[in-house]
Amino acid sequence: MARLSRKEIPGTTCSVEGTLNLIDGKWKIVILYKLLRGTLRFNEIRRLLPGVTQRMLTNQLRELEADGLVTRTVYAQVPPRVEYDLSDLGRSLEPVLVAMKTWGDANLNLSSPTAKAA
Amino acid sequence: MARLSRKEIPGTTCSVEGTLNLIDGKWKIVILYKLLRGTLRFNEIRRLLPGVTQRMLTNQLRELEADGLVTRTVYAQVPPRVEYDLSDLGRSLEPVLVAMKTWGDANLNLSSPTAKAA
DNA sequence: GCACATAGTGTCGAAAAGGATACCATGATG
DNA sequence: CATCATGGTATCCTTTTCGACACTATGTGC
């Protein structure tokens, strides 16, 4: 849904919608949520999201980075080492993420037993 | 993104994601947000969302209804009168909506001058 | 000198979401 | 008799999103 950095979202005149646009995307909120606990490397995130493809993960991370929500740090090593972190802006989303988590835990009955842990 | 009532969302093992699935859709959060203030008729909502087509609005409302977030009341009148309201479940989303609104107001610079009012 | 791991990129195609447009029934109003 | 308003449907088409799969560079270990 979103693709236009938050700077200028034409036609979006509502901040609720604007916020949604940034965290919308198949894997974005989950990535953000996982990053609340700290730095993660590319393949660490990948392992946390069963089913994500490399291309999708790259896309989602790139969009999050373009929107200023996560930072990407590349270490000149071989094999490569790339770390992802929440930016200050990304971290400021914590109340939103937590509100969603809380609501979901209270009102959704997800099939998986690890639902609450995720 | 979402289409499968909240009862069973296969592959969704995370409540943050599950919550997003319910409020995702071009107009859903905005509709929910508008409904926080009270009952609205079909065309009232339509006028509040410049650019929405009848088909899209119907779709979004039907999905919100199927997910148990809004109620739809039809009055046997001519011209027809159909009222939409938040269900208890829908109203329980208020903290999420408010968190998103707050974050958006603080961190997004939307072009329109009516941004904050929306 | 071959495989392995990391962190990607590129191409293609299917599926889903969204938009444009036209149409419908009904009763009131002029 | 024609028009308006309400709350929709139906059909078609375009755009966006997502997934599968193949391919890459490089240094290390066997």
Image: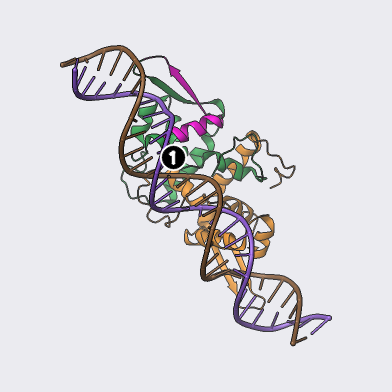
Chain colours: A orange, B green, C brown, D purple
Residue A44 higher or lower than B103, as above or below = below
What residue is rendered at 48% in x and 46% in y?
A20
Residue B61, image x and y in percent?
47, 32
What residue is rendered at 56% in x and 32% in y?
B67
Q: Chain of mark 1?
A: B
Q: Is residue A45 left or right of residue B105?
A: right
Which residue is nearer to you in this view: B40 or A40? Answer: B40
Q: Residue A54 occupies which quadrant of the picture?
A: bottom right
Residue B53 higher or lower than A117, as above or below = above
What residue is rendered at 64% in x and 58% in y?
A38
Question: Judging from the image, what secondary structure is the residue with disc 1 in?
Answer: loop
Q: Residue C22 occupies which quadrant of the picture?
A: top left
Residue C1, image x and y in percent?
74, 87
Residue C3, image x and y in percent?
76, 76
Does the image show residue A39? no
Which residue is nearer to you in this view: B49 or A39? Answer: B49
Q: Is residue D3 left or right of residue B56?
A: left
> Label 1, on which residue?
B27
Q: Is residue D2 left or right of residue C3?
A: left
Dot 1, crowdedness within 10 Å: few (<14), some or many (≥20)? some
Residue B11 among those drawn in magenta: no
Does the image show residue A53? yes
Residue B25 higher or lower than B81, as above or below = below
Residue B75 among those drawn in magenta: yes
Which residue is nearer to you in this view: A114 or D21? Answer: D21
Residue range of the region highlighted in magenta in the rendering: B56-77
For badge 1, the amino acid type reads Trp
